[in-house]
Image: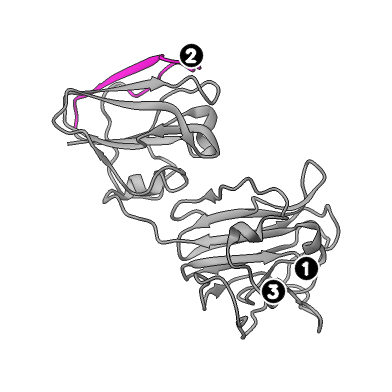
Amino acid sequence: MQRPSTRRQFLAGTGLTALAVTAGCVSSSGTGPTDNETEAATSTPESLDTWFDDSNGYDGEPVKYGPLSQPVIMVGETTDGGLAFDPPVIEVSPMTNVTWDWTSHGGQQNVVALDGTFDSGRTNAQIGTSYNYIFDEVGEYPYVSEPHRDEGMKGAVIVKERESSGYPAIDQWLGSTGNFDGTITDRTGKSEATVAVGAEGNGGQYAFDPPTIKISTGTTVIWEWTGAGAAHNVFSTDGSQMESDSVISDDGSPLDSELVSEEDSTYKHTFEETGVSLYTCQPHQGLGMKGAVVVE
């Protein structure tokens, strides 16, 4: 069962300094809100840190989504028996369509922004219920499930403009990578360049550092394992799942290291062709452990 969204025409008098004023809304059909549909708090927190002091499921790091993604947030009881949004905090680009799906576990639920920007309306406990909203303004959007706010069922959507690296394929590929800020580390003119494997990032030791480097043709890249974050590997992707017209280089033999965890392990590859090479750690790709090499 699905419902239409409703949008309040007021904004709370106080709020996060970065809260946006407008956003677009898309939803599905069904029953509408009641007169007492959405009585979320009229006061909003000074910061998301204070907002999540008594929340469920948040580990302090937002889950990041790249451009063209369509995040889905589960609404209801989690596997450990707590009431939460999963993931509780996400970071997206403007014009991202976010969907909340009801699990049917944990009783009646709804999704209501504290500033009234979005509102799913009447509470519901039925599986198959969903609500979606397009965020078209930069800002921080804390929200609750009204019946379970006092039990810590809180969430937030952070909408940020992404810094562009100048390479659309890289921006899309690394959009969900926590330690990528649009910067490409310049290693051109050097015979070798190193990348740490298992560096801090993405909620643990699940990052390549630096995530993106620029090198000259003939440069050998050396990936060095830190020994942290379990076993990792370095594995090429051709970008076939990306919605991008950018050219991905085919540099002969693809990156394909062994899956290892030992500190000081290394893997080397010499890049002879210009282009963009995208790679990942296969076991931790879902966490955002990805990298890229630009060869000029």
Where residue 146 sits, quadrant-wise, is bottom right
Q: Amino acid at mark 3?
A: Pro
What is the quadrant of the N terminus in the image? Answer: bottom right
Seen at 62% across and 81% down, the residue is 12
On the image, numbered disc 1 is attached to which residue? 146
The disc placed on residue 4 is 3
Seen at 50% across and 17% down, the residue is 261
Q: Secondary structure at mark 1?
A: helix
Residue 294 at what x, y percent from top left? 25, 37
Name the foreground residue: 56 vs 233. 56
Seen at 45% across and 61% down, the residue is 160
Q: What are the residue bounds of the magenta stretch? A: 254-273
Residue 30 at what x, y percent from top left? 75, 73
- Against 197, residue 85 (above or below) is below
On the image, numbered disc 2 is attached to which residue? 262
Asked if marks 1 and 2 touch (Cβ < 8 Å), the reply is no
Q: Amino acid at mark 1?
A: Glu
The reply to whether the magenta stretch includes residue 261 is yes
Q: Secondary structure at mark 3?
A: loop
The reply to whether the magenta stretch includes residue 204 is no
